[in-house]
Image (cartoon, rainbow, N blue to C red):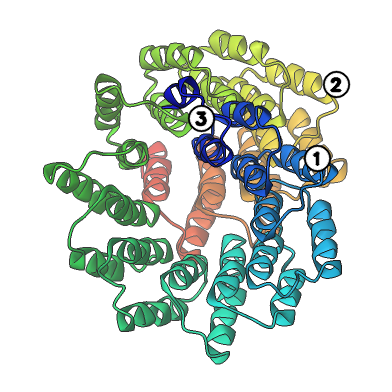
Amino acid sequence: MHIEIAVEGFETYKNIANTLIDMYSKLGLLEEAQGVFDELDSPDVVSWTALIAGYAEHGFHVEVQRCLNQMQKEGCYPNVPTFICSLKACSLQGSLDWGHKMHTRFVKEGFENDALISCALVDMYAKHSSFAEAEAVLNFSSDQNVASWNALITGFAEQGASEAALECLDRMENFGLSSNEITLLSSLKACSKSVTSRCGYRVHNEIVKKGFETPQTCGNALVDMYGKCGLLTDAQAVFDKLKYHDVIGWTSLIAGYADHGFREEALKHLKQMQLEGVPLDIILWNIAIACHAEEEEIEEALVVHASMHEQGILFNCFSFMTALQVCAKTASIEVGRRLHIHIQAFKDFDDAEDLLSTALIDMYAKCGSMNEALQVFEQIRKKSLVQWNAIISGYACQVESKLVFWTFNQMMNQCLQPDALTFNSILFACSHSGLLKEGEMFYEAMVEEHNILPQVRHDNCMIGLLGRSGCLNEAVLMLEKIPFSKDSVSWNSVLGACRRSGDLELSEQTFNTLVTLGQQNTTSFVMMANVYADIGK
C-alpha cells in the first residue's frame, strides 16, 4: 500500500503521511514511521503526536523526550494528546524525574485540571508506586472520573497493596462513581493477593449485580482470583458457569489446583481440557511435568516432556528446569544430557543463564557425574553464590569432603559470603565423613564469623556427626539445647548412634522421649526393634 501511495506521489500529502506514520507506529515499525516523518517538509502536531505515540508505546522514552523537545524548537506546540503520549512513556519505562518536570509544566500552563491529563498523571505516578502523588493529583482534579480511579486501583493492585486498592474502590463509590468492568478486574487482581477471602466475595457480588459474571474476561478473572486464594470450590463453581472454556480459564483453574497441592485434580482437568480439544499452552505443559514429578510419577513426567518436543512446543526456562529436576530425582543422566544440548541450542535464555546453569550442575551432581557438573560450572563467566553452592552440594553428596573444603576456600577467595545452604552442605560432608574436628570448626565459624543462625538441618548434621564419632552424651546434650528446632531426624540420629554403640539404656530413653514428644515414625520403631534384635531380646 505504501509503495502504491509513493508511486502515485501521495506520500507528501500531510494527511496521508500522518496516517502512514500512525500505522507504522502501531505496528512497531518505528524506523519506517521515522522515515515517512523525515520526508515531510513541515510536520504538524498530528505528525509529531503519531510519532511520539509509537515511541512511547514501545518503550523508547528517550526518543519521546527528543521528539518533544525538537517539535517545540521547530515552532510546533504540543496538544493534550501529545502530552498524554509523553506521560505514557514515563509510565512504561521513563524516569519519574521527567514525569515531575512534565507535571510542573502542566501546572504552569493550566493543563492540570484537564480530565485526560489528570488521568494520565495518576496512571504515571501509580506505575512508579508514587501513590501519595497519584492521590494528590486525583484529589486536586475538579473532574474526577472512573478512569482516574481505575488507574489508582490498578496501581495498588499491581504492587500487591490489596487493602489500599479495595479502600480506593470504597472511596470511589462514596464519591458517587459506579465501578465498571476495568475497576472490577483490577479489584479482583488485588483480592488475589489479599490474605482474606472477604474482599473476593464482595467484588464477586458486585460483578454479579452488574451482570459481568458470565462474560469471559470477568469469569476467567474470578476463577484466577479464587484459585490463587485457594478457594478451589468457588473457582470450580465459576468455571462451570462459563459459557465456554478457553485456555485462560483452564490455566487459571488448573494452576489453582496445582499451586495448592491438589495435583491429581490438576492432572484430571488437564486430561479433560485435552478431551475438549483445547490446546495446552506452555504454562500448562510445565504444570503437567511438575505435577507428575511431585507425585513421583517420573516416567509420566518424562513422557510429557517428550510429547512437548514431538509437538514442536517451544520450551521456556521453567520447562527445562522442571525436566532437569525430574532427571536429578531419577538419575536419568542420558535424558539430562539431551536437555543440556537443547539448552545450548537456544539463544533466548541469557537472562536465565544462572538458573539453568545451577539446574544443570545439580542434575549432573545428583546423577553422580561431577566431571560434567564441573564442566558446566567452569563455563560460567561470573559465578554466583547459588552456583558455588550447587557444586559444593554435589561434592558433599558424594562425601568428597576434601573437595568440599577446597571449593569452599576457592569461593571465599572470590569474596563471596557463604549462606545457610553452603554450611548445610559442608556439615553434611563432615557428618558423613566422620570429621568431628572440622565439623565443629565450621559450625562455630557459621555462627561466630558469618552470623548465620543454626537451622534444624545444621543441628541434625552435628548431632549425627557426634553420634557417629561415639560422642553420645555430647549429642544428647546438643539435642537438649535446641528444644524448638529438634525433629524426628535429630532423635533418630541419636537412636542410630545408640544402636551402633550398643547402649540399650540410652536407646530406650531416646525412643521413649520420641514417643512422649509424638515424633516417633516408622524409622524409629525399626531402629528400636534392631536394637533389641542386636542383643537377642
* 463 on left or right of 497: right
Upstream in the sequence, badge 3 or badge 1? 3
- The structure residue drawn at horizontal position 65% and vertical position 47%, both measured from the top left corner, is 49
Q: Amino acid at mark 1?
A: Gln
Tell me the quarter of the image containing the N terminus.
top left
Q: Residues within 10 Å of mark 1 (few under 14, many from 20)?
A: few
Q: Which label sits on residue 413?
A: 2
Which of the pair 469/504 is nearer the observer? 469
Secondary element type, mark 1: helix
Q: Position of residue 270 (x, y in %)?
A: 22, 45
- Helix, strand or loop at disc 2? helix
> What is the three-letter code of the residue carrying label 3?
Phe
Image vertical order of residue 7 relative to residue 95, above or below: above
Q: Which residue is mark 3?
A: 10
The disc, 1 or 2, on the residue closer to the chain's N-terminal end is: 1
Q: Which badge, 3 or 2, is on the more N-terminal residue?
A: 3
Gap between marks 1 and 2, in whole Å?
A: 53 Å
Between 331 and 179, the residue placed more toward the observer is 179
The reply, left or right, for residue 428 in relation to residue 190 is right
Q: Where is the C terminus found, in terms of image quarters?
A: top left
Residue 322: image quadrant is: top left
User: Would you say residue 432 is visible in this rendering?
Assistant: no
Q: Position of residue 122 (x, y in %)?
A: 67, 67
Element at badge 3? loop
Residue that mark 1 sits on: 70
